[in-house]
Amino acid sequence: MNAILEVNGLCKSFNHFSLKDIGFSLPEGCITGFIGINGSGKTTTIKSILGLVLKEAGEVKLFGQEFDKNERELKNRIGIVMDEGYLYEDLTIKEMTKVFAPAYSTWDEYVFSSYIKRFKLDPNQKIAALSKGMRMKYAIALALSHHADLLIMDEPTSGLDPLVRSELMDILLDFMKEEGKSVFFSTHITSDLDKVADLLIMIDDGKIVFIEEKDTLLDTHGLVKGDKRLLNEHNRNLFLKLRETEYGFEGVTNQKAAIRQEMNGVLIERPSIETIMLGYVGGNKNAY
Amino acid sequence: MKIIIANVSDLPIYQQIKDQIKDAILQGELTEGQRLPSLRELANDLHVSVLTTRRVYDELETEGFVVSKPGKGSFVATANLELLRESKRHMVEVKLMEAWETARSLGIPKSELYAMMNLIFAEEDKD
Amino acid sequence: MLINLVKKDLLLAKKYLIIMFIFAIAAPIYVQLNSGGGLASFFVTVIMVQYMLVNTVSFAEDKSKGSVLLCTTPYTRDYLVKARYLFILLVFACCYIIYTLTAFISPIHLEMLGIHALGISFLATAICFGLMLPFQYRFGYKTTRYIFFFIIFISLFTFPALAKSVHINTIFQITVPFSQGIQDILPWIIALVIGYISMLVSLHIYSHKDF
């Protein structure tokens, strides 16, 4: 599979936070979820890739070409939705579109109108009057109306109700039906990813923690529940995170086979992405 | 075609999907030459990764169950009796393994499993 | 592409366009009646109109940060800066046209502006916004708005008085020993140079900004 986005050695430091040597490669035709808790570096990474934040080191390649050298051409092929929206509040949808559309040589007014109709948006309405959900839908309409091959989104679902989030996931799945499309989006609401993600990349404290196929992740990790008395010095180390209560223990492990061998009578379930993510977030082993 | 992914099974997701598609083919639910859902369609419907469905189709093709034509999709391969026979045996083996894995993860020992099986056979023989 | 970004600035200033249009007609007449001097009335008007509109646009940009999204598009950062400068030029040109038309129609006598007088106004525009824009790009709208508000209003009130007491035109004629033709063009050339340098500085600042 071709790599649609390649990031290598990306570094950027601020006063209280830095990105350390971020690198990953996104295969074509996949939806990649970029997960991490708030403050882990998701937005900074995406902004660095897009050139909104100037990176101190590293290279970014899109569709095999260096981003810095072919900026205008490559930007034509990506659709972008940012958490903050960055839309002009005082303009109407129609006016904002009139400003935005001419930037793209591949702008398709027909596709755009279809999205607007589908989302039931009123072109004459001021952007300031739109709800968060409608704003996001408008931003998606803008991003998907110039035949982009890669959709990059930063926390597109934060602050949205489950129904809208589900609608958005359906829009993404629709988008992917066409050949050669890819999606990369960051979120800390991992339940959305349970439904649509193909690949997962986790970031924590500015460093990449893992890059894994979603199903492989779910296969190799386990949510283990059992009697507290079964825990000992040795098998505690098999857990990424462990929580003990009055009634027993619950832990996340990436060594299912070992657990099964050494601990009898425990229940091993397939974990959710959220459980796995919390298993890797740095710090207190017992607090999850 | 029925594909249901179990949450407590130890079998990897792709294995479960592969087995169930194979079942469907061997039991004639999917006929020769029938078009299988596209990678993306299958992935979307089962809520699994498209990389998983790709692996499933790739392995099914290697094992001779599926044929893919670039640009057209994936199709059920024409039947091969030898293959069928061997596969049927293999299918039962897989099911037995599954039963054993499940029993083990739930803490049911071998002896009890034997007892359970004998009970089932006894019931069957009665009919 | 550039035109669309200038259109963007116009859309952002939409609320005040009509008011400024009326102001551009009325203000020169008012200043003429009170302080006299074609140059003074145009000068005050054009600086005010430009300032009000640029301020409105900058405020809107600062509020919604819409330019960030535009930076992710093929427009790229450079065009956003260039369009702003072009916008100011456009406003200047419009003010001149309005002034000239008003002078034709108005019953109250308004001096028509010669190249030299217009050049002085243009130079003032260049100095004023040539300083303001890079500062705004560097330090942000919120920090700089009060400073420039102050500067502009002080200069606007002192200029007409200054112009009356010290005939600006004659100063230029005395101190510079060039031919009349060159003296006419001189303010334009200086203005263009200042404007160009300012734009280069702004481009540099903006291209190194983290959003």
Image (cartoon, helix red, strand yellow):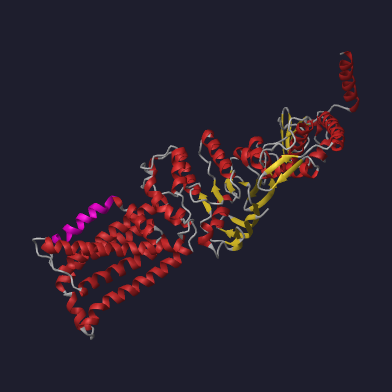
Q: Position of residue C94 (x, y in %)?
A: 25, 62
Q: Position of residue A278 (x, y in %)?
A: 66, 41
| Along the line of sight, the residue nearer the viewer: A117 or C105 | A117
Residue at figure coordinates x 29%, y 50% from the top left = C15
Q: Is residue B20 above or below residue A277?
A: above
Q: Hey, which quadrant is residue C9 in on the image?
A: bottom left
Residue extending furthest toward the left: C107
| Along the line of sight, the residue nearer the viewer: A181 or A240 | A181
Give the magenta part as a residue range. Answer: C15-31
Q: Is residue C23 within the magenta segment?
A: yes
Q: Position of residue C167 (x, y in %)?
A: 16, 75
Q: Mark yes or no: residue A276 visible.
A: yes
| Along the line of sight, the residue nearer the viewer: A106 or C6 | A106
Main SS class of the magenta portion in the image: helix
Q: Position of residue B103 (x, y in %)?
A: 83, 28
Residue at figure coordinates x 55%, y 65% from the top left = A69
Q: Is residue B21 within the magenta segment?
A: no
Quarter holding the C terminus of chain A is top right
| Along the line of sight, the residue nearer the viewer: C71 or B127 | B127
Q: Would residue C197 be found to the left or right of residue A224 on screen? A: left
Q: Hey, which quadrant is residue A177 in on the image?
A: top right
Q: Would residue A266 be found to the left or right of residue C141 on screen? A: right
Numbered label tally = 0
Q: Would residue A232 be found to the left or right of residue A129 on screen? A: right
Q: Is residue C81 above or below residue A145?
A: below
Residue at figure coordinates x 19%, y 81% from the top left = C173
Q: Is residue A59 above or below residue C197?
A: above
Q: Would residue A7 be found to the left or right of residue B60 on screen? A: left
Q: Mark yes or no: residue C31 visible.
A: no
